[in-house]
Image (cartoon, coloured by chain):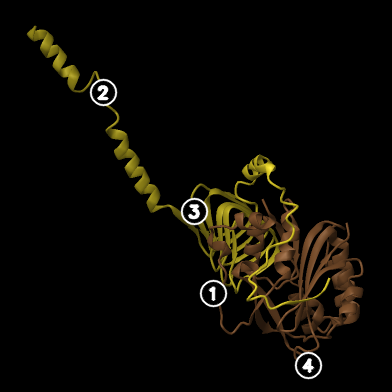
Chain colours: A yellow, B brown
Amino acid sequence: MWKRDEAVRPTGGQPVVPPPPAAAPPTASRTEVGHFMERDIVNIGKSVVIKGELNGSEDLTIEGHVEGTIQLRDHVLTIGPNGKIKAQVFAKMVIVLGEVHGNVTATEKVDIRDNGSVEGDLVSPRIAIAEGAHFKGSVDMQRKGAPQQKQEQPKPAVQPSAGTAVVPPPVVPQAAAGQRVGA
Amino acid sequence: MGLLDRISSRKSESEAAVFPPPADSDPLFSTKALRKFLGCLTSRELPVLIDLGPVVGSNIAYFGEQLGCKIFVVDLFADLDRFVREGRLEDFADFIDKKFTQEAASVDGILCWDFIDYLDKVTSQRLANQLTRVLRPDGALLGFFSSSAQNGDTTHSHYNKFIVADEGVNLRARAYPALRGRQSVLLNRDIIKLFSGLRVSDSFLLKNNQREILFRKPA
């Protein structure tokens, strides 16, 4: 019995049965997260010139020159005031304070700030262009959940279709300054 | 579901549609034709729009969110200024002919604003021809035209940015410097002749004596 007990005790402690791993990973992941938090935003400095394909999985700020393609599918790309881009850009969100020549596709938002400049086509569900910004190109704003709307539309088909109600209701009669002149 | 219901259902909660802060100095006037213009486009899936400019970010966000459309921003005001600056105004009509690369009958709506007022007769006819060409049957064109009673002189050296306000009920006219003033005040019949390929759907005379005219292309 004693021998058995002694034989069992050590095994319950350390070597044979490893300690439940649940305790270790959280600390490991915390350190990893902290590590990522620290280096979450990457900068490409003024003097850096990149030609080719730029891929990343973290937020990126570009102050230098990039030619080619930039892909940050799930992250924010910021073109700093000194940044000059000649590239096709794909990102979750694109903030432009510098110059971009090329098409920009963002799954969330394109934001052209004051003094920012874009010459190219924008594709994004949300687009903001500041008063002093320069923009030349086209804007394609896909609707959020457009396919869902299409699927839902047939359901209320019992109601009169949208095409029939062409005449809009009177628009703020007091403020309406217009007189109808002719048709 | 009515058209206006569809319009309002597309209102976005995003800040992109936030209008610029009201500037008291910018005259605000109501518009009737803009809502009708939007009504023409909401029945279309993924409409294509041409905005003759200038670039107004809040307008782009507004039209994009209301219509879910593709917008070509063609800032002809900037081009006109460039031609004036370079002393090549006589080439502007040719430039207009080449500017619109869209295929014929490929555009659902055109925001012409008051650009025609700044052109001579020849150039405005060339522009009208191009706009008529690219407009799809049943498409809509919105134009503003100053009237003779507006100011008397035709040499305003500023353009207007028409900024959509109050969900398209009002427009705010923000003046900015221009190198070319208004060239002429067109009579209604001149405007109708200019866009002879289109029919006038609605026409309004605003209190500020500006005419807003909505054209439709016969189907």
**Residue at image mark 1:** B21
- Do the residues marked 4 and 1 share a common chain? yes
At a point 68% along the width and 42% down the height, the residue shown is A158
Label 3–label 2 contact, CB within 8 A = no
- Do the residues marked 4 and 2 share a common chain? no
- Between residues A120 and B38, which one lies in front from this camera angle? B38
The 10 Å Cα crowd at callout 2, few under 14, some 14 to 19, many 20 or more, is: few
Note whether residue B70 is visible: yes
Q: Chain of mark 2?
A: A
Answer with left or right where residue A24 lies relative to residue A87: left
Three-letter amino acid code at the position of disc 4: Gly
- Between residues A158 and B174, which one lies in front from this camera angle? A158
The percent position of residue A140, horizontal first and vertical second, equals 68, 56
The 10 Å Cα crowd at callout 1, few under 14, some 14 to 19, many 20 or more, is: few
At a point 83% along the width and 58% down the height, the residue shown is B138
Q: Secondary structure at mark 3?
A: strand
Of label 4 and label 1, which has the lower sequence position?
A: 1
| Numbered disc in front, either 2 or 1 | 1
Of label 3 and label 2, which has the lower sequence position?
A: 2
Q: Chain of mark 4?
A: B
Q: Secondary structure at mark 4?
A: loop
- Do the residues marked 3 and 2 share a common chain? yes
Q: In the picture, which quadrant includes the C terminus of chain B?
A: bottom right
| Numbered disc in front, either 3 or 1 | 1
Three-letter amino acid code at the position of disc 2: Pro
At a point 29% along the width and 39% down the height, the residue shown is A27
In the image, residue A27 sits, relative to residue B172, either above or below, namely: above
**Residue at image mark 4:** B152
Disc 4 from disc 2: Cα separation: 93 Å
Disc 4 from disc 1: Cα separation: 31 Å
**Residue at image mark 3:** A59
Three-letter amino acid code at the position of disc 3: Asp
